[in-house]
Image: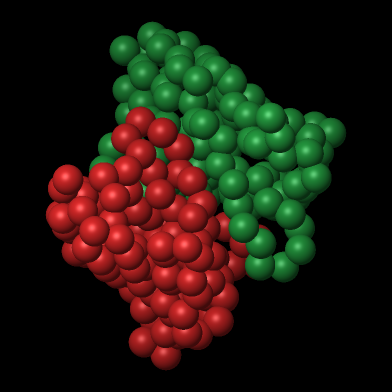
């Protein structure tokens, strides 16, 4: 399977705990995006990497959120001191770095904070 | 102000009918436009992309773009029950090619 892969698919955590999600993009794609989606809404942009460089972060991304893409391949998104409002689907997408290209999403990680 | 608007919906059509889904956007410099299909509990799946004014057809799907009116639409011909899903309009809004999404339109195709 050469699509975008995310792990885990589901995560239930207690409020205050830290969680980390992983995204493996399509192998030749050097653009990687994280989005968050809540029920009844479209995905909201969180952050963007081109290779290993984090080039843009949304104002939505509080200091409890951090993302890395250390070798320009897979990426991790960590949420520290989770809150109930963090419950959402976290989506990763990747695309080629060639002008106006299409982005493809992984299966998503469903986070539930209890 | 919301940058991508999908105001109509939910939409219900009988099997075999044409479903018309509409989207407007506010950023005049947007250059690329996408439709994603999302089944309940699943992630968005890209079904159409369009970059220039006019129509683009792919099978039963036709995307239409009018940059002057800042309007993009998706037509689904011969709608099938399997087309029942939420359809998300997405617009490329910036140098980093990040996407801004509408909230989606839920389509139900009645057998």
Q: Nearer the viewer, residue A84 or B75?
A: B75
Q: Nearer the viewer, residue B31 or B21?
A: B21
Q: Residue at 26%, 45% (x, y): give it.
A: B81
Does residue B87 lie above or below A89 as drawn?
Answer: below
Residue A92 x %, y %: 57, 38
Quadrant of the image occupied by residue A39? top left
Callout count: 0
Q: Would residue B110 appear left or right of A92 to someone viewing this image? A: left
Q: How is the image coloured?
A: by chain
Residue B3 x %, y %: 38, 67
Residue A76 visible, this angle: yes
Q: Residue furthest right?
A: A71
Q: Which chain is green?
A: A
Residue A86 visible, this angle: no
Residue A19 x %, y %: 53, 17
Q: Residue at 22%, 63% (x, y): give it.
A: B17
Q: Nearer the viewer, residue B20 or B86?
A: B20
Quadrant of the image occupied by residue A52? top right
Q: Residue at 74%, 54% (x, y): give it.
A: A96
Q: Residue furthest bottom?
A: B68
Residue A43 x %, y %: 42, 46
Does residue A41 lie above or below A65 as drawn?
Answer: below
Image quadrant holding the C terminus of chain A, namely top left
Q: Residue at 21%, 53% (x, y): give it.
A: B15
Q: Would residue B61 appear left or right of A101 to someone viewing this image? A: left
Q: Which chain is red?
A: B
Does residue A10 lie above or below A95 as drawn?
Answer: above
Q: Would residue A18 appear left or right of A97 to someone viewing this image? A: left
Image quadrant holding the N terminus of chain A, namely top right
């Amino acid at each position: 399977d050469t699509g975008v892969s995310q792990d885990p698919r589901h995560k239930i955590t207690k409020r205050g705990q830290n969680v980390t999600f992983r995204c493996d993009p399509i192998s030749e794609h050097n653009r990687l995006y994280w989005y968050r989606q809540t029920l009844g809404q479209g995905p909201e942009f969180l952050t963007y990497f081109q290779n290993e460089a984090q080039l843009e972060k949304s104002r939505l991304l509080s200091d409890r959120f951090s993302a890395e893409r250390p070798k320009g391949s897979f990426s991790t998104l960590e949420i520290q001191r989770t809150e109930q409002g963090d419950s959402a689907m976290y989506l990763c997408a990747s695309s080629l770095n060639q002008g106006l290209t299409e982005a493809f999403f992984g299966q998503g990680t469903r986070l539930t904070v209890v | 102000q919301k940058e991508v608007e999908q105001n109509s919906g939910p939409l219900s059509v009988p099997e075999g009918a044409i479903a018309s889904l509409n989207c407007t956007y506010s950023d005049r410099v947007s250059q690329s436009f996408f439709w994603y299909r999302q089944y309940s509990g699943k992630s968005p799946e890209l079904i159409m992309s369009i970059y220039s004014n006019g129509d683009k057809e792919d099978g039963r799907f036709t995307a239409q773009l009018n940059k002057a009116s800042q309007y993009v639409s998706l037509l689904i011909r011969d709608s099938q029950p399997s087309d029942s899903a939420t359809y998300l309009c997405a617009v490329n809004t910036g140098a980093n090619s990040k996407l801004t999404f509408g909230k989606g339109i839920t389509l139900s195709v009645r057998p």
